[in-house]
Amino acid sequence: MRILLFTGKGGVGKSTVAAGTAALAAAAGQRTLVLSTDAAHSLADAFGAPVGSEPTEVAERLFVQQVDAQLRFEQSWAEIQGYLLSVLDVAGVDPVAAEELTVIPGAEEVLALLELRLHALSGEWDVVVVDCAPTAETLRLLALPEALGWYMERVLPTQRRVVKALKPVLTRAAGVPMPGDGLFDAVERLHAELDEVHTLLSGPDASVRLVLTPEAVVLAEARRSYTSLSLFGYRVDGVVANRVFPAEGADDWRAGWVVAQDAVLAEVDQSFAGLPVWRSEYRPAEPVGVEALRTLAAEVYAGADPLAVPEGEGPFRVERTASGAVLHLSLPFVTRTEVGLARNGDELVVTVGSYRRLLTLPAGLARLQVAGARVDEGELRVRFADPAHADATEKVT
């Protein structure tokens, strides 16, 4: 099953491009689902058809679904939220305020992606196109499975044992309800489901497509997104530059825009060298409906296969050497001063700006020491060597 995710800064037209790509895939004979996880759904508007929280057929082999994020939130978070509410109730917190305090910002958008897991397990689809929430919300997903995994492996087992042993004493002493097995099980289920989603999205048949408009601010965010997506192992397979003013027939006002956009588009080509950059011209009317969307996508991809699986090993790989191994992690646009690196047991902690990833090292690397690290041509390279021969250092050079 081919999985394509579209993301970008709010208002750049990612929903339109995602819908058009899905329409083109269905026209090519692929049973296609386009799925919106954005709380501000707009697929129904794009297709000009009523769309609900279950897959709705809008054309032959083309189905659309706008995920009910609130429902997914209630299904996956209800038991955890219920316990938190009981604790806040004992503390005397107002019920309305307590309910707000027990909702993680962005959780609905993240949990909506659990719908993707169900569709992957169903085996009904050849292609799933995901119209993600704007970039900031989408990136919340990236760190969550690994961070939760760290808690599950190191903290939760101990916490469960402590609570079982001390529950009667703690409940009487503090007057606060202690978590039961049901709560721990709910957290474990949530982690397992999110981990499956992460595996799907970072797998060989999945990739992310960035949508932008030719504006300096939008390009800057797209570059940051490319870095963050690579940090967490997500493969970016191309960029769609949307709403490009055509040069022909431009009056003086539009000619000024053409010049300004050309300058930014040159930066786009340079920034994403090695990736296809497709362009979508500004249209005289908004494309609405399956036919209009399919026509737009056909013009954007201009004969290229929009479902082509990206080649290569992805942003994360390990190369074996005579003295040990080298870990390669693609970090586009990053300089060495922006990267923090630390070793904690069998984990490598990589920090880039405000994002941090805990990389659990394969067994073959975990027994080795970090012998050096450097950032070179947009890639972090960490050298590992046998402890008997390594002059261990974790400084990034």
Image (spheres, rainbow, N blue to C red):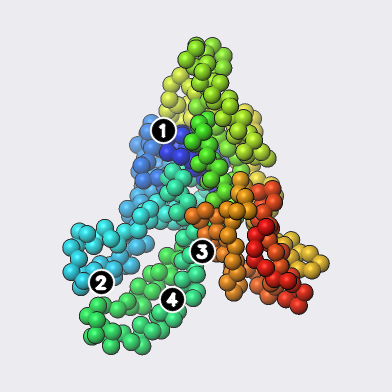
Q: Between residues 22 and 393, which one lies in front from this camera angle?
A: 393
Q: Is mark 3 on a helix, strand or loop?
A: helix
Contact, CB < 8 Å: mark 3 with mark 1? no
Number of marks in the image? 4
Task: Name the residue tied to disc 4.
Answer: 156
Disc 4 from disc 2: Cα separation: 19 Å
- Which mark is on residue 87? 2
Q: What element carries label 4?
A: helix
Q: Which amino acid does label 2 sit on?
A: Val
| Mark 2 or mark 1, whichever is nearer to me | 2
Q: What residue type is labelled 4?
A: Leu
Contact, CB < 8 Å: mark 3 with mark 2? no
Check disc 2: other Cα within 10 Å, few if <14, some if 14-19, many if 20+. Answer: some
Disc 2 from disc 1: Cα separation: 44 Å
Query: Mark 4 or mark 1, which is nearer the start of the sequence?
Result: 1
Q: Is 318 situated left or right of 30 in this image?
A: right
Q: What residue type is labelled 1?
A: Ala
Q: Is 45 situated left or right of 255 in this image?
A: left
- Which mark is on residue 263? none
Task: Name the residue tied to disc 1.
Answer: 46
Q: Quadrant of residue 298?
A: top right
